[in-house]
Amino acid sequence: MSEVKNVKKYEFKAEVKKLLDILVHSLYTSREIFLRELISNASDALDKLRFEQNRGTEIIDNELPLEIKITFDEKNKILTISDTGIGMSHVEVITNIGTIAKSGTEEFAKMLSEVKGDIGNIIGKFGVGFYSVFMVAKEVVIKTKSYKKDEPAVEWKSDGLGDYEISELDENIKRGTTIIVHLKDDAEEFVQKWKLESVIKKHSNFISFPIYLDKEKINTVTAIWREPKSSIKKEQYDEFYKFLTYDNDPPMDVIHKSVDAPIQFNALLFIPKKSNELFFYDRENYGLDLYVRRVLIQHKNKDLLPEYLSFVKGVVDSEDLPLNISRETLQENVIFTKIASSVTSNILSYLIDKSKNDKVGYNEFWNEHGKIFKLGYMDFTNHEKYVELVRFNSSNCNDEKELVSFAEYVERMKEGQKEIYYIVGNNRSALLVDPHLEIFKNKGLEVLFLYDPVDEFVIQAIRKYKDYEIKSVQNVDLKKLNELKDVEEKKQDVEPLSVDDQKHFYSLLSKMKNILGDKVEDVVESKRLIDSASCLISKDETVSSQMKKILKMTKQDFMIDKKIMEVNPNHKLIRNLVKVFKKNSYDDFITLVTEQLYDSALLQEGNLEDPHKLIERLNKSLEQSSEWYTKINNLE
Ligand code: ADP
Ligand code: MG
């Protein structure tokens, strides 16, 4: 027996206490995942040790086999999991087990407390797995010895309630970690062999070190990514994917590649059905597992994937990298960077095939992962593929779920059309009634709808598709547009204004400019409007009003620039206003209408800060019109 000295008591950090409190006092259907977490920690510790061995580091008990042993004592309800991994020093036990280093832990604990039902995959994904043992344990003892020379063995003990004890043990212990779990009375199933065996097979089958349950090896230990594609069944892929991601659903897609020249590597990649629900808590948690000749070099390596493909999960394994490669210098390794760029282009090619052969599936992919994928506009190396893969909603679609590619857009272009058009707005219903679109509807021209702020960056990065420039509807050359044929008959063919009224109309425009003063740059006759009385146009077209709104939110002193107000001389309201103006150019009604038109246009583009005046004016006009209405209908 080892002799215990220097027992010290510590309190858990506040966030750990909170987390433990949730875990200890809740009953979850998926309690069994505690075993998966302990085995995964053991496997991590073994991976780390093997990594140090490959680097030639001096290691104590170097001859020990790398393995995980699980034993159980039915009578005393004790379950023991031990590994021959790197172990922990005294200081490491305190920092690794007593605290949670991760940021966002507090939000995470809060979220856990709100989630009902299955927390198994959330715990695993967030990486606070060790504590899940307290779902089944009334006490946990850790005995551990670091691989480093001269580090004493350490014992850690806790009931998971508020504090833990640490003490140093004598030298008898071999390198590695043993976790002794004293089970709660209601968790005795975890000292039954069949139960343990089924849990290990279910969650830990692909661990790359042997797992012995009472001397019997339980897991299969195959690197399925190195097997020929034809020999692997869908169920095996699904099983491996679940093992890798803790996802409950099978993957949306499996990409299994074996590349031999110029550089040998195998990649087994998955696209999940759902995008990461923890994205905001856990933005950094992505990457592919990198193996060299079946030996894990790094979990979640981020340099194998650009961020815009961060939804892809999986492993990459190469024969051509040295086993003793250091993680720090990976990025500078030419072979590694070639593998990384080949992985990216393989994923993009896969997606291009999918978009051609399985449109429905591709749309599902886009609606789930498009938000992240879009960020690929910065990947200039793969620009051509990216452009083919981008999707937008458009005026041509039947609803907001339908998607359009540039290729499809171009195929449908009208005779004489030389540009691709887009408009920015909050949602489809707002854009469908946007006055800027009227002339496009009239000419039967398709317009891409951009709802997401990122879309504008995407468009600006693409700029041109084939020979067609991509232009904002606000930025079009109206003369060129007017040369194109109308597809719809103008609804009410209005008589043009008489020469005399034309003059009054222009005076009315300057009057309106006076009323609005500094709020607008100018008030001018519109050549684009058909159904609406007026609209606002930006003078500086490179930045849309939507984008300016964002800039204004981030930079307080950013001024939304002055707009030009366009007025439709053929609109009934404006015709009537000309009549009023002719009679009395100082009539208050002109002020009321002008201000109202301006505010409505602001409201439409989402830039009206205070709607009170607009409502006041609206109510006033309703009151007036009710009087006219009663008069006309002889209701007095
Ligand atoms: P994670 O595994 O995501 O880091 P855990 O809560 O599962 O989070 O474990 C916390 C830390 O405790 C690990 O990162 C590791 O440093 C340490 N640890 C846990 N189990 C072992 C073990 N068997 N051997 C060595 N270190 C371990
Ligand atoms: Mg863990």
Image (cartoon, grey):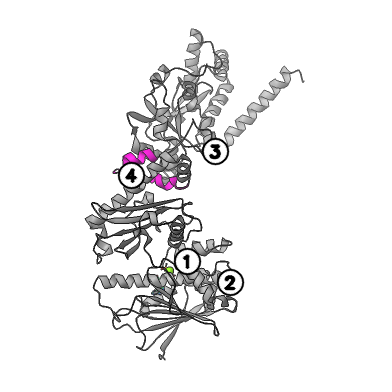
Residue 326 image offset from top left, x and y in percent: 26, 65
Q: Which of 10 and 86 is in front in this view?
A: 86
Q: Which of marks 1 and 2 is in front?
A: 1
CA separation in Å, label 4 and label 3 = 38 Å
Q: Kindly identify which residue carries mark 2.
A: 25
Query: Which residue shows up at 39% across the image and 35% down it?
Result: 543
How packed mark 2 is, by other alpha carbons closer than 10 Å (few <14, some 14-19, many 20 or more), is few
Q: What residue type is labelled 1?
A: His
At mark 1, the secondary structure is helix
Q: Identify the disc placed on residue 203.
A: 1
Q: Kindly identify which residue carries mark 4.
A: 378
Q: Kindly identify which residue carries mark 3.
A: 610
CA separation in Å, label 1 and label 4 = 38 Å
Q: Nearer the viewer, residue 350 or 441?
A: 350
Q: Is the magenta stretch mostly helix, strand or loop?
A: helix
What quarter of the picture does the C terminus occupy? Answer: top right
Query: Which residue shows up at 58% across the image and 22% down it?
Result: 588
357 drawn magenta? no
Label 1 vs 2, first from the N-terminus: 2
How packed mark 1 is, by other alpha carbons closer than 10 Å (few <14, some 14-19, many 20 or more), is many
Q: What residue type is labelled 4?
A: Met
Q: Which amino acid does label 2 sit on?
A: His
Asked whether the beta carbons under mark 1 and mark 3 sit within 8 Å of each other, the answer is: no
Horizontal side of 456 relative to 304 (left or right) equals: right
Q: Is residue 14 visible?
A: no
Magenta highlight range:
368-389
Residue 68 image offset from top left, x and y in percent: 40, 75
Instruction: Report which quarter residue 548 is drawn in.
Output: top left
